[in-house]
Image: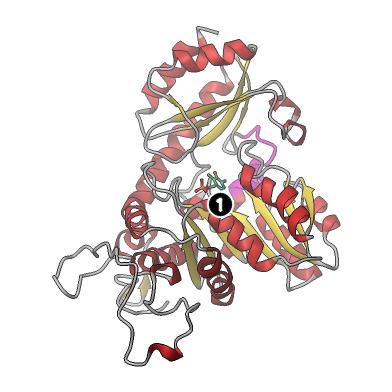
Amino acid sequence: MTTDSIHKGVSFDDQPLGFSTRSIHLGNGTDAETGAIRRPITLANAYALPYDASELNWSSSDLNLYARNGHPNQRYLESKIANLEGSEDAVVLASGVAALAATFTTFLSRGDHAIFSDTTYIAAYRLLNEILPKKYGIETSIVDTSNTQNVQRAIRPNTRLIHIETPANPTLKVSDIATIARYAHDANPEILVSVDNTFNTPFNVQPIKLGADIVIESLTKYINGHGDALGGSIAASKSVTDQIRFTSQVNYGGVISPFNAWLINRGSVTLPLRMRQHNASAQLIAEHLADHPKVSFVAYPGLKSHPNHDIAASQLVGSDAGYSGVLSFGLQTNHDGYNRFIAALHIVTSAVSLGHDESLIVFLGENDERQYLYPEAFHQGFLRFAVGLEDADDLIRDLDQALHTI
Ligand SMILES: *Cc1c(COP(=O)(O)O)cnc(C)c1O
């Protein structure tokens, strides 16, 4: 753990501090100029140059130079994310997709091969299935990574990256991070295993501890938690983050704004409290829906009936951890019935995204272009439900009355 002025309250009496204490104190500190006990938002684009600036490297990201090279609010948030993920360092960029694209474009070159989960966030699919192969000559394989044998079989001599999303959005398949990392590194220690941990957050699962090299989060979701700022992070060793800053942040320019970095730093203070509530409410609602006669299926890793429940349980960080707040479910109805159900909801909002304070639901129809990659139960259309922080009883009443209308 580095101990510069950004870090405060990281350890006490040589005992490591808990996740909640670190979520509150890291990334904050006393402002040297005013004594304010909240670090300010520094909006400046540019910083004063030294006496002889001619020797500076204008692509450098380790000094205050120009905000795209890195800025204080970004660095405060990075110090917190790295600590919570248990990684040596972290880079924070403008969105989760900026973090995904930065990882892929920094480490994949023409002729390299990448393996990725058959269910991923749509932009990861678009990048790895279409854009990088067509424009940059990168070979990619789509694999059901919830079966580790599939991953082992797909590794080639030129495999450079294995990108797994777990739980996967929106099928909620869970992959065995430790076994995949072991297969990858046994085959070739140079292979980077990256995990999109957006659904779990480090409160529930910490992929670095399981052997992953890179952890990507859409900070937009649970880590900010309030639905009002986009951001993304890459947690990894310093050699990985240095390459990402140098190649991608400075030259592709997906830097986060100081204001969004500040908002996410503030929102993340309550991450542990919020995750406990998301975990508990989603578990209750998943169990309730699984017993409802008008529900055709429920996909939630916290249900004992989920095909990957045991591996999901084995990955949890501590006794407070759970299976996060997102579940997918189907209705015993047709296309119109799904739309009627959504229209009948009073509390739950129909909108994309997840990890907000309020509950969000989205109808993913039977014509989704990736239907062929989803399990059979999803083929007639389904709902992705991001359980919010409202009283779980209210949410259940809202769902039940809407289920009556289909
Ligand atoms: C939302 C999401 C992303 C993309 O993040 P943005 O911040 O919207 O760019 C990536 N992965 C997962 C699993 C997500 O849910």
Residue beneath the point at 37% across and 37% down: 357
Residue lying farthest to the front in this orientation: 54
- Eyeballing the image, is 388 above or below 295? below
Q: Is residue 199 left or right of residue 305?
A: left
Q: Which residue is mark 1?
A: 97
Q: Is residue 59 left or right of residue 158?
A: left
Front one among 44 and 266: 44
- Eyeballing the image, is 338 above or below 271? above
User: Does 311 appear in magenta?
Assistant: yes
Q: Position of residue 329 (x, y in %)?
A: 60, 25
Residue lying farthest to the left in this orientation: 34
Q: Position of residue 296 (x, y in %)?
A: 65, 18
User: Does 253 appear in magenta?
Assistant: no
Quarter residue 193 falls in: bottom right
- How packed mark 1 is, by other alpha carbons closer than 10 Å (few <14, some 14-19, many 20 or more), is many
Secondary structure found at label 1? helix
Q: Is mark 1 within 8 Å of ligand 1?
A: yes
Residue type (three-letter) at the residue carrying disc 1? Val
Give the quadrant of the C terminus.
top right
Q: Which region shows up in magenta?
A: 304-313
